[in-house]
């Protein structure tokens, strides 16, 4: 397979899209919904009546999303409340559009998540709902789960509740638009509260400080993406803007409030991530020592990781290694039976928290894109209003962890292989070309990390991972003296466009 390109690092649109189509077909991920599911979605969109819901259309909500987004799950409004803040967060009320047990419901359970690809999104729900009737588009009335989050002067959550209401978003904003407004007073529509960017920053920063105090941590690794470029696609790395970080803190705040509501009642579903094992933290300390990073013995791993960026080669390599501490995320359905409260061992209580967040957490802010949120939202609404939780929710809860695991694994495989295809198509025909990059991982010939290998050259040959900045590629590299965190020159030696793999070999470490 050959790649025609407008410049060396851009893959022609039709070539990459054909490769991704083949991957979708192989993995059984299709865009088309069953005809009856489409009909149910259209009927629901026509029949929706929100006139009896509490009217909250006076609140000046806005949405903040990537440019061009149509599946708008969340709308935000923040105001000062005494020495603290009242955060109102409206979440699309998808449950009003999906008939429990219907064809559409079964199809949504089969899909589990929206899959985002360079050329399209494969939606969880038909676009008549996800990009229209259920989406929180501007200047139209919509049903929403409306969260009231009372935040104290230090950023702590004081109280939270959720209701089903009718709302109206005033504007659809982008991250870059709000960032520009915050940075230099860039233009925002008059319908947007003038203090919105400032209040978002204040609450976001306070919540980030709360995260530090909880022992939460997030990795500052650049995100590898496939972006459109001059009629084709190219690979790029990007870091989150400040507005994206602040906005994410509002979502985390809501998820933490929801988790606590459900845990207090022992019903619902929470997102979990086990705490890092001591042996893994010890190994990471050895990696830091090898890279020449000063990790004081008294400093917790979360604090040390937080102190680093991805600005230097050694820090980038360390953060890549640190991802091993954040594996094993899943879902836990509630109620927890009495005999499971201690996981069968009185000395080891069941961990219902999320280690990276440093607190219990639930997914409740993306129901257009994630199946589990629809159920957790309805549980929280019922608990806050004192209503009985519907049977369609109770019956689904035990199956959701497995359904979500299957869906996210399949979506992750497709997205990873799409990136692999883009890497291979970017580099095919360029064998022998040399690139500058950073060694971010080293695996010895015998399978151990950072080992010494055998005596002869073949036995001493090491495998590792090299990160190139241009093109934005992360790929296998071999060499005799691979050193994590070192900037090197590598030569492209093999490209497999069918498997989506590329291989480099070390030239030097200058």
Image (spheres, helix red, strand yellow):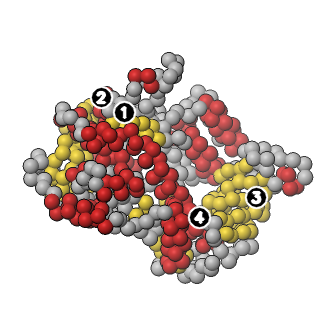
From the image, tell me which residue sits under label 3.
478
Front position among marks 2 and 4: 2
**Above or below: residue 492 compared with residue 84:** below
Residue at 16% x, 63% y: name it: 46
Q: Which labelled disc corresponds to residue 334?
A: 1
Residue indicated by mark 4: 420
> Upstream in the sequence, badge 3 or badge 2?
2
Quadrant, the C terminus = bottom right
Please tell me whether mark 4 or mark 1 is closer to you in this view.
1
Please state the horizontal and vertical placement of residue 124, each as a whole percent of the image: 36, 58
Residue 172 in sight: no
Sequence-wise first label, 4 or 3: 4
Whichever of labels 1 and 2 marks the residue nearer the N terminus, that label is 2
Q: Disc 1 vs disc 2: which is toward the camera?
A: 1
Q: CA distance from mark 4 to mark 3?
A: 18 Å
Left/right of residue 175 with respect to residue 149 in the rendered view: right
Q: Residue furthest left?
A: 52
Instruction: Please say whether residue 432 is visible from this viewpoint.
Output: yes
Of circles 3 and 1, the one toward us is 1
Q: Would you say the residues marked 1 and 2 are in contact, meaning their CB atoms lie under 8 Å apart?
A: yes
Measure the alpha-carbon separation of dots 2 and 4: 44 Å
Q: Position of residue 503 (x, y in %)?
A: 70, 64
């Amino acid at each position: 397979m050959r790649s025609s390109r407008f410049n060396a690092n851009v893959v022609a649109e039709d070539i990459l899209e054909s490769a991704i189509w083949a991957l979708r077909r192989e993995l059984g991920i299709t865009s088309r919904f069953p005809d009856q599911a489409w009909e149910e979605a259209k009927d629901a969109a026509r029949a929706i009546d929100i006139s009896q819901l509490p009217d909250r259309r006076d609140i000046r909500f806005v949405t903040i999303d990537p440019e061009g987004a149509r599946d708008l799950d969340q709308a935000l409004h923040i105001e000062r409340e005494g020495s603290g803040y009242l955060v109102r967060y409206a979440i699309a009320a998808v449950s009003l559009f999906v008939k429990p047990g219907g064809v559409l419901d079964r199809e949504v359970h089969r899909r589990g998540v929206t899959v985002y690809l360079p050329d399209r999104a494969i939606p969880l729900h038909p676009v008549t709902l996800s990009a229209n009737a259920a989406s929180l588009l501007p200047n139209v009335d919509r049903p929403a789960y409306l969260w009231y989050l009372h935040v104290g002067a230090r950023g702590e959550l004081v109280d939270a509740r959720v209701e089903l209401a009718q709302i109206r978003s005033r504007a659809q904003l982008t991250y870059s638009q709000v960032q520009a407004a915050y940075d230099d007073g860039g233009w925002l529509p008059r319908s947007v509260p003038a203090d919105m960017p400032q209040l978002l920053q204040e609450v976001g920063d306070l919540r980030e400080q709360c995260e530090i105090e909880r022992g939460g941590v997030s990795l500052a690794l650049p995100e590898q993406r496939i972006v459109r470029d001059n009629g084709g696609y190219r690979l790029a790395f990007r870091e989150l803007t400040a507005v994206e970080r602040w906005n994410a803190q509002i979502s985390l705040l809501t998820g933490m409030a929801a988790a606590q509501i459900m845990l207090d009642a022992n019903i619902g579903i929470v997102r979990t991530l086990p705490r890092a094992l001591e042996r893994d933290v010890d190994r990471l300390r050895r990696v830091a020592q090898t890279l020449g990073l000063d990790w004081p013995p008294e400093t917790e791993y979360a604090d040390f990781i937080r102190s680093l960026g991805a600005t230097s080669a050694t820090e980038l390599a360390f953060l890549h290694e640190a991802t091993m501490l954040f594996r094993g995320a899943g879902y836990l359905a509630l109620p927890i039976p009495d005999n499971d409260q201690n996981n069968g061992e009185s000395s080891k209580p069941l961990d219902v928290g999320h280690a990276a967040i440093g607190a219990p957490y639930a997914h409740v802010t993306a129901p257009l894109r994630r199946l589990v949120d629809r159920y957790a939202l309805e549980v929280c609404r019922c608990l806050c209003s004192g209503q009985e939780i519907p049977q369609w929710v109770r019956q689904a809860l035990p199956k959701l962890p497995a359904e979500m695991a299957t869906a996210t694994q399949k979506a992750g495989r497709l997205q990873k292989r799409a990136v692999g295809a883009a890497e291979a198509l970017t580099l095919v025909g360029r064998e022998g070309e040399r690139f500058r990059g950073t060694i971010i991982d080293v695996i010895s010939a015998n399978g151990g990390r950072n080992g010494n290998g055998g005596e002869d050259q073949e036995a001493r040959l090491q495998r590792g991972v090299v990160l190139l900045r241009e093109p934005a590629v992360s790929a296998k590299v071999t060499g005799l003296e691979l050193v994590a965190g070192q900037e090197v020159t590598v030569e492209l030696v093999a490209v497999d466009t069918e498997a989506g793999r590329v291989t480099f070999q070390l030239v030097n470490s200058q």
